[in-house]
Image (cartoon, grey):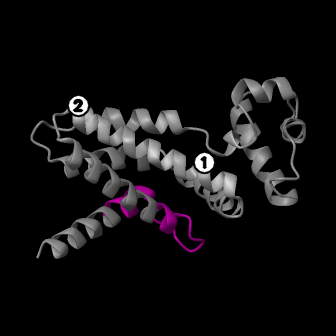
Amino acid sequence: MPRWEPNAHQRLMRAALDLFTEKGYDATTVNEIADRAGLTKTTFFRHFSDKREVLFAGQDIHGRLLVQAIHAAPDSATPLEAVRAALDALAAVFTDDRREFAARLRPIVADHLELRERAALKRTSLVDTLAKALEERGVPDLTSDLAADLGMRAFDNAFDRWIEPDNEQPLTDLTRRAFDELRTAMATLHG
């Protein structure tokens, strides 16, 4: 691949995933990722701080989408309704062309403690982002924390369903269903 081709970021992500699948995460170097993508090591480090981060790209974008959707929710929206709108915005960026990448990524992360820790940190950061956006709407701390955590639980559940090999449903539909299931479970707990 010529070095001048566009989409270096995506090329590096795909190259990393291919190499991690073929050789394993630990056995793959940054140089190999850059070479596979047809780029230089310097270009790799312009896009990612290390090989772990190549698997978690987009967190800042995801956080911004969540905040924008929370802020755009109608004033009359309950905290859970605002979170649902935020999850709709987040799920919409996970198009079918990203499904295969996500499905291949899951076992790599599951097999490495450092990657599982990074995934947990990413999730915690997104929950905190949601909670802070709710607090900016005037939602009390405990309520915003609970709504944010419940929303991300619904998203995580939907994401797991989305990457199943026989699933063809859009992540937005699965997220809405998981969110509704969560609300039903909460109502059951309330009695």
Amino acid type at circle 2 is Glu
Q: Is residue 61 magenta?
A: no
How far across and how far down the image is residue 81, in percent?
A: 20, 50
Q: Residue, x 41% and y 57% (percent of image)?
A: 155
- Camera-side residue of 118 and 181: 118
Residue carrying label 1: 118
Amino acid type at circle 1 is Arg
Q: Is residue 161 magenta?
A: yes
Which quadrant holds residue 96?
bottom right
Which quadrant holds residue 21?
bottom right
How far across and how far down the image is residue 67, in percent?
A: 34, 34
Residue carrying label 2: 136
Q: Is residue 185 left or right of residue 23?
A: left
Q: Residues within 10 Å of mark 1 (few under 14, many from 20)?
A: some
Q: Please determine whether, in this image, residue 171 is positioned above or below residue 77.
A: below
Q: In what quadrant of the picture does the C terminus appear?
A: bottom left
Cα–Cα gap, marks 2 and 1: 27 Å
Can residue 181 be seen in this snapshot? yes
Q: Label 2's element?
A: helix
- Camera-side residue of 133 and 103: 133
Specify which label sits upstream in the sequence, 2 or 1. Answer: 1
